[in-house]
Amino acid sequence: MTDRIRKAGRHTSQSEGLIFEKSVPDKRGMELPPLDVPAVDARQALGAAYLRDTLEGFPEVSEVEVMRHYTRLSTWNYAIDLGMYPLGSCTMKYNPRVNEYVARLDGIATEHPYQPVELSQGCLRILDTLQNCLVEVTGMDACTLQPASGAHGELTGLLLIRAYLENQGNPRKKVLIPDSAHGTNPATAAIAGYAVENIRSDANGQIDVARLREIVNEDVAGLMVTNPSTVGVFEQHIAEIAQILHAKGALLYMDGANMNALAGIARPGDFGVDVMHLNLHKTYSTPHGGGGPGAGPVVVKKLLEPFLPVPVIAHQSDGRLTLDFNRPKTLGRMRAFYGNFGVLVRALAYALAYGPGIRQASEDAVLNANYIRKHLEDLFDLPYKFPSMHEVVFSDARQKKNGVSTTDIAKRLIDYGFHPYTTAFPLIVHGALMIEPTESESREECDLFIHAMRSIAEEAATNPELVKTAPHTTRVGRLDEVGAARKPILRWTPKATTEAAD
Ligand SMILES: *Cc1c(COP(=O)(O)O)cnc(C)c1O
């Protein structure tokens, strides 16, 4: 196993093994000066229970070996600090360092969530200001910052719809979801206790409004729409869609994870949305990925405000802020404390840095996606010709003729120094290449990406094997993804044990 991995790369950094394998008996990372105080017998001082006689397989390495080991490993990672991360739907924009600085300030990083409100006025002000910013940008009326992710925001939003309808006497039975929705949407509706009914998209990737009009009835609690949708197009009939739902007492939920195309340009509250979530770890540039903390705040229209999770930040008559737990119609808590505070601080730093200038971020995101589209559409199939918003979705239909799939192209992109785009999503596009450059990328960086994609298209036509066997420059090539998921090796075991087990 280790031999196979070792062979994969020739460069020293790529051949890096496990730190345990570097171990040489009695090698040390440091040396203490001779003792100039009386020695203490730790066994006596602490009790034998605290002492280990042996530490099986503990790596014995020098300081520089430790440094090099971890530094080499760090070069295996791809990061937004290294290059473009065009994962469609994920909005992998750059996280400005100033946001990190602000989140680490004393009095922000060191506060405790159980501090009494009299001592948390600054933190509450941060949360209150962020809520106001999000309400303003979305054109809604009220906000909760509790949800920890986009999917968690969706669940909060649907539970709000359920609470509102229940309060009216009937929670209703189903939620409508277009086939262009993000995969989390149907999962959320099911967890909120609703049956999911699919609505097909028309040839432009838009909700079929005539069909919607037919199926909205008193059983429908609401519609969940991702706007712009996962094919990167804006729902042209969104205001009419809202009217159709409202006429039957149903509500409109908008998955706002793609707000990076709209912020500062269009406000969902103005086109009929009743409740939506935002992904701060996308649109508001907070760190993203690896399962770390995110934030999926939910903003609502007035009619849903009484049902928001507790506590709600409230203004006292003396101008101070407090936490209001006394909300009889609340759906309860969605999370401990007030949400992922550190993430919320970063988002506020970003929101305040841009102010109304957030509009230019959205415009540049849309411009970059369309720039890439224009320079690739002669080589890659474009299933939906409708204008692109912040992302562009191609298909591998042309390359497929030579047996090259979207996955192959994505793997080859790694050899050109880019993180792959999103493959095989959204599901309504067969063999999708979903590309979202975000506004962070300069024209020069977009050109590099375009050049790489054009070169790969050329390779797919003239030397398909090269693409189908990519990547060629990484430490390991194509992994057995099923094996990795089904039989993960999660722990290193000392050699003697491994050999015995083999
Ligand atoms: C990212 C995304 C989600 C899910 O957000 P998480 O924070 O990963 O839970 C939902 N909908 C859309 C459209 C997204 O792009």
Image (tube, rainbow, N blue to C red):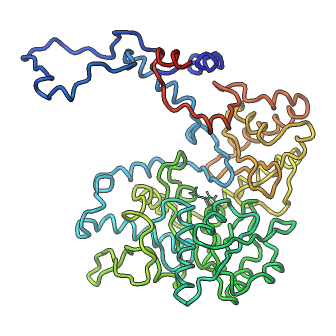
Question: In the picture provided, is 187 more to the left or to the right than 394?
Answer: left
In the image shown, does 32 or 379 lie closer to the viewer? 32
Residue displayed at 46% across by 47% down: 97
In the image shown, does 342 or 28 lie closer to the viewer? 28
- Residue 129: which quarter of the image? bottom left
Residue displayed at 71% across by 30% down: 478
Residue 287, compared with residue 454, is above or below; it is below
User: Total marks drawn?
Assistant: 0
- Residue 202: which quarter of the image? bottom right
Ligand 1, by image quadrant, is: bottom right
Residue 386, compared with residue 499, is above or below; it is below
> Where in the figure is residue 325, as x and y percent of width and height?
34, 77
Residue displayed at 78% across by 28% down: 469
> Where in the figure is residue 172, as x and y percent of width and height?
63, 82
Instruction: Quadrant for the C terminus, please.
Output: top right
Instruction: Quadrant for the N terminus, please.
Output: top right
> Where in the figure is residue 298, as x and y percent of width and height?
52, 70
> Where in the figure is residue 102, as x and y percent of width and height?
38, 53
Residue at the left extreme, as displayed = 38
In the image shown, does 59 or 208 lie closer to the viewer? 59
